[in-house]
């Protein structure tokens, strides 16, 4: 392939394709077709690899997070509504 496929060409191919066709057993995923992609269960355009991981909470931030999560768990354990606003009875 000398030129990349445009979005319009991909759209035209997708609309012209038969939705009920069976995939052949030896079919190659599109990210491996050009021979330049790694062999992953999901292609990188579908679910890209995360850049980094978040820093773990330490100190007072961890305590605040645990209190907030614990509060929601306790409120829900008592059967009270904690996420849907004001509840009126009557």
Image: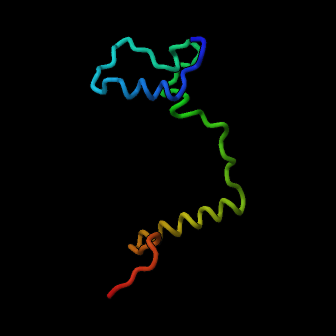
Left or right placement of residue 64 versus residue 29 in this view: right
Left or right placement of residue 3 versus residue 8 in this view: right
* 38 or 12, nearer to the observer: 12
- Picture quarter containing residue 2? top right
Please identify the quadrant where the C terminus is shown: bottom left
Residue 62 position, x and y percent, is 66, 59
Total numbered labels: 0
Residue 54 position, x and y percent, is 66, 46
Residue 86 position, x and y percent, is 44, 79
| Picture residue at 65% right of the left edge, 42% below the top | 53
Residue at the left extreme of this rendering: 20
* Image: 50 above or below 22: below
- Picture quarter containing residue 27? top left
* 83 or 79, nearer to the observer: 83
* Image: 59 above or below 13: below
Please identify the quadrant where the N terminus is shown: top right
* Image: 28 above or below 15: above
Residue 32 position, x and y percent, is 52, 16
Left or right placement of residue 37 versus residue 41 in this view: right
| Picture residue at 46% right of the left edge, 75% below the top | 85
| Picture residue at 50% right of the left edge, 14% below the top | 33
* 74 or 17, nearer to the observer: 17
Colour mapping: rainbow
| Picture residue at 47% right of the left edge, 25% below the top | 10
Residue at the bottom extreme of this rendering: 90
* Image: 50 above or below 67: above
């Amino acid at each position: 392939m000398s030129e990349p496929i445009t979005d319009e060409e991909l759209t035209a191919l997708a609309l012209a394709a038969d939705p009920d066709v069976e995939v052949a057993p030896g079919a190659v995923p599109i990210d491996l077709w050009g021979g330049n992609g790694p062999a992953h269960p999901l292609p990188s355009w579908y679910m890209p690899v995360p850049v980094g991981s978040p820093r773990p909470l330490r100190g007072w931030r961890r305590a605040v997070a645990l209190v907030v999560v614990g509060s929601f768990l306790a409120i829900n354990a008592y059967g009270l509504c904690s996420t849907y606003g004001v509840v009126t009875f009557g």
